[in-house]
Image (cartoon, rainbow, N blue to C red):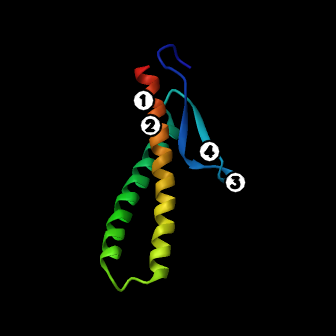
Amino acid sequence: MTGHSAEYVRLLPWTGSEGKPCYLIGDGEGYVSRMADEVESVQLDMADDLLSHVDDLLGDHRATSEQLRYVVARLAESLRDVHRIARSRGARLALRTG
């Protein structure tokens, strides 16, 4: 580590084997940090797109129970991703302000 960089632990926006969390120890400036930022951005964009799809599906009275179960499963996946991002960003913010 260089003298001007602070080392911290970052919860990454993906899981490892068996769904276990992955962490990065570093200064937040490297390749993996940039890749994690990009993955978070994609996950948040996908969550936004999914919400639009859900709005459309809920407005369609012809939507089947299979369609609704499918979209609920995707919402659960997306919520897990967004929750992980929020925890990660909250922890990093606490380090910067604390």
The answer to the question of whether label 2 and label 1 lie on touching residues, with beta carbons closer than 8 A, is yes
The answer to the question of whether label 2 and label 4 lie on touching residues, with beta carbons closer than 8 A, is no
Residue 18 disc label: 3
Image coords of residue 23 (percent x, y) = 60, 38
Residue kind at label 4, given as amino acid type: Pro
First-in-chain label (3 vs 1) = 3
Q: Residues within 10 Å of mark 4 (few under 14, many from 20)?
A: few
Q: What distance separates the C-alpha of mark 2 from that of mark 3? A: 23 Å
Image coords of residue 97 (percent x, y) = 40, 21
Q: Which residue is mark 4?
A: 21
Q: Is residue 47 left or right of residue 31?
A: left
Location of the C terminus by quadrant is: top left
Q: What distance separates the C-alpha of mark 2 from that of mark 1? A: 6 Å
Residue kind at label 3, given as amino acid type: Glu
Q: Which residue is mark 2?
A: 89
Q: Quadrant of residue 56?
A: bottom left
Q: Residue lying furthest bottom in this view?
A: 62
The answer to the question of whether label 3 and label 1 lie on touching residues, with beta carbons closer than 8 A, is no
